[in-house]
């Protein structure tokens, strides 16, 4: 059931109405029923994967909770040896949960790619079962495994009611494309009792409409042009390729952030605040900052459950000591951390999909971030010698433009169907740009009209204007609350009218899926 379909709007409306009509102690049960109904709507056969992850991580949490309890009950004289023994058992439980769930993810998402690589390299054919890809599989596995690790660390107490835990894993607004929530933040809200709140309804509707505006008015419209160029990229010069990649950058941001706004808006109508997943990444001044602002919950998951355990592990501490002894200066200091960074971005790359271009995308970001750390002492010396206001708005803008250019180059890799195609398009953009082709009418032969381009440009101007206001410390909702009734009414009706009059639903729209739903 696509978020942009009429059936979803009817489904969400029905859930919200019944949610506030049933006794509050039953609200979590209704959400569980609604979540599984949503998941089974289009493909009930794949619900087995969701159940598998739910049951394996639920049992792992119970085992870990019992081991934690036994550790707390140890007598003082047995504390040290007993804790070490229990810690080993806990690690085996976590390892089993990870192997079962990431093994399932590998079989579903990466085994066909592995078989293809093996066959191309050796000529040997591996068996590839015909399996349906479950909706949101990466998201619910990451969320459930994060819960297991939190139980291991004693950060959360395991949930003993399997139904309540199943709701945490399957909550329907976020199961498609995140955000990836933490148990201690989301579960109390899911299980709490929520009286009807007009503010929650109002804010949720506003946020969802903002998301629909970004998705239907901007992303779907510019996506037509992007798809046209990438379907026959060899027919176009570098300037048109660059325009298509710029269009894809706009499409991706409005599609993904718009989808998250719809998700968070739907949850807010139910009195539930989901984690923020975007924090105005287009205003970032460095690549590191960009990834801290983009897909925040995935980055936080990688940081807390992979980067820190890896960087603080014994092998990496030894590697760091070795590097500091044998390499002078910055290289020795950041060597081990840089290796861990490469691992993280490699994982983030393949998380997006089984393709060499995603691996290359991970290494592209890891290399640039590491290079920035290595060159930082040089940049500091340069800044000391040049008579420039490094804290001024001009330099701030230069940093934003530089970061945008780096991210833009990376979009060639993620949008092209193959890595070689991305490299070819990058080469053509640099060596065969032909700027005149941007003005000779070619842009109007790519599936959209001049009016469509105007709508995209004005739509992005609105998005950037709102984000610029927020970046300066403004609060859009507070600003609206302080305005008169007409302005508040206009703020609600304007995006609604834009969606109705300008949204892709008026162009033989069939309900395009969100880009990040495929990951």
Image: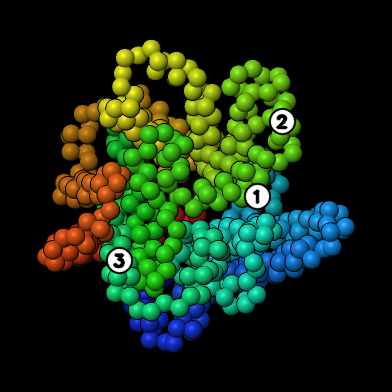
Residue 98 is situated, as x and y percent measured from the top left of the image, at: 68, 57
Q: Is residue 466 visible?
A: yes
Residue 218 is situated, as x and y percent measured from the top left of the image, at: 26, 53
Q: Is residue 96 above or below residue 30?
A: above
Distance of mark 3 from mark 2, alpha carbons? Answer: 50 Å
Residue 504 is situated, as x and y percent measured from the top left of the image, at: 25, 60
Q: Is residue 416 visible?
A: no
Q: What numbered label is drawn on residue 115?
A: 1
Q: Are marks 1 and 3 in contact (CB under 8 Å)?
A: no
Disc 2 crowd rating (10 Å Cα; few below 14, some 14-19, many 20+) is: some
Find numbered disc 2 in the image and state the secondary structure of the residue it sits on. helix
Residue 75 is situated, as x and y percent measured from the top left of the image, at: 84, 62
Q: Mark 3 or mark 2, which has the lower sequence index?
A: 3
Q: Nearer the viewer, residue 453 or 434?
A: 453
Which numbered mark, 2 or 1, is in the foreground of this view?
Answer: 2
Q: What numbered label is drawn on residue 319?
A: 2
Q: Mark 2 or mark 1, which has the lower sequence index?
A: 1
Residue 129 falls left or right of residue 36: right
The residue that appears at 51% across and 47% down in the rendered structure is 299
Query: Which image quadrant: the N terminus?
Result: bottom left
Find numbered disc 1 in the image and state the secondary structure of the residue it sits on. helix
Q: Nearer the viewer, residue 100 or 353?
A: 100
Distance of mark 1 from mark 3, alpha carbons? Answer: 48 Å
The residue that appears at 45% across and 58% down in the rendered structure is 275
Q: Mark 1 or mark 3, which has the lower sequence index?
A: 1
Residue holding disc 3: 203
Q: Is residue 325 above or below residue 214?
A: above
């Amino acid at each position: 059931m696509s978020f942009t379909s009429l059936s979803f709007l009817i489904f969400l409306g029905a859930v919200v109405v019944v949610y506030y009509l049933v006794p509050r102690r039953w609200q979590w049960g209704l959400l569980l029923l609604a979540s599984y109904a949503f998941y089974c709507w289009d493909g009930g056969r794949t619900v087995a994967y969701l159940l598998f992850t739910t049951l394996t991580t639920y049992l792992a949490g119970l085992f870990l909770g019992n081991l934690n309890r036994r550790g707390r009950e140890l007598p003082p004289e047995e504390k040290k040896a007993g804790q070490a023994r229990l810690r080993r058992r806990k690690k085996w439980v976590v390892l089993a949960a990870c192997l079962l769930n990431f093994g399932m993810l590998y079989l579903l998402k990466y085994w066909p790619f592995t078989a293809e690589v093996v066959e191309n390299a050796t000529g040997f054919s591996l068996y590839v079962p015909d399996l349906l890809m479950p909706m949101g599989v990466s998201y619910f596995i990451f969320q459930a495994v994060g819960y297991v690790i939190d139980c291991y660390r004693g950060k959360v107490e395991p949930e003993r009611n399997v139904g309540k835990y199943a709701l945490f894993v399957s909550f329907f607004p976020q199961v498609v494309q995140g955000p990836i929530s933490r148990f201690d933040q989301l579960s109390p809200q899911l299980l709490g009792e929520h009286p009807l709140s007009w503010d929650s309804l109002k804010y949720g509707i506003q946020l969802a409409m903002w998301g629909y505006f970004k998705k239907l008015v901007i992303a779907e419209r510019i996506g037509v042009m992007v798809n046209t160029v990438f379907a026959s990229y060899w027919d176009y010069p570098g300037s048109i390729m660059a325009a298509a990649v710029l269009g894809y950058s706009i499409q991706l941001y409005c599609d993904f952030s718009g989808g998250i706004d719809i998700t968070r808006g739907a949850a807010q109508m139910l009195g539930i605040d989901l984690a923020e997943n975007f924090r105005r990444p287009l205003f970032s001044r460095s690549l590191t900052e960009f990834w801290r602002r983009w897909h925040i919950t995935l980055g936080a998951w990688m940081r807390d459950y992979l980067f820190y355990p890896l960087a603080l592990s014994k092998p990496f501490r030894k590697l760091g000591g070795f590097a500091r002894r044998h390499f002078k200066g910055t290289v020795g200091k950041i060597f081990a951390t840089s290796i861990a960074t490469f691992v993280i971005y490699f994982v983030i790359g393949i998380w997006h999909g089984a393709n060499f271009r995603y691996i290359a995308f991970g290494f592209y970001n890891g290399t640039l971030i590491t290079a920035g750390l290595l060159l930082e002492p040089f940049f500091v010396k340069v800044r000391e010698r040049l008579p420039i206001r490094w804290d001024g708005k001009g330099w701030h803008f230069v940093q934003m433009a530089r970061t945008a250019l780096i991210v833009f180059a990376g979009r060639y890799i993620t949008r092209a169907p193959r890595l070689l195609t991305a490299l070819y398009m990058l080469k053509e953009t640099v060596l065969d740009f032909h700027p005149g082709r941007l003005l000779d009418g070619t842009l109007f032969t790519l599936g959209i009209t001049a009016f469509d381009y105007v709508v995209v440009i004005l739509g992005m101007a609105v998005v950037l204007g709102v984000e610029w206001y927020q970046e300066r410390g403004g609060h859009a909702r507070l600003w609206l609350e302080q305005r008169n009734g007409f302005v508040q009414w206009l703020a609600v009706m304007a995006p609604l009218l834009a969606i109705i009059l300008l949204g892709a639903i008026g162009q033989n729209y069939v309900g395009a899926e969100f880009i990040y739903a495929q990951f």
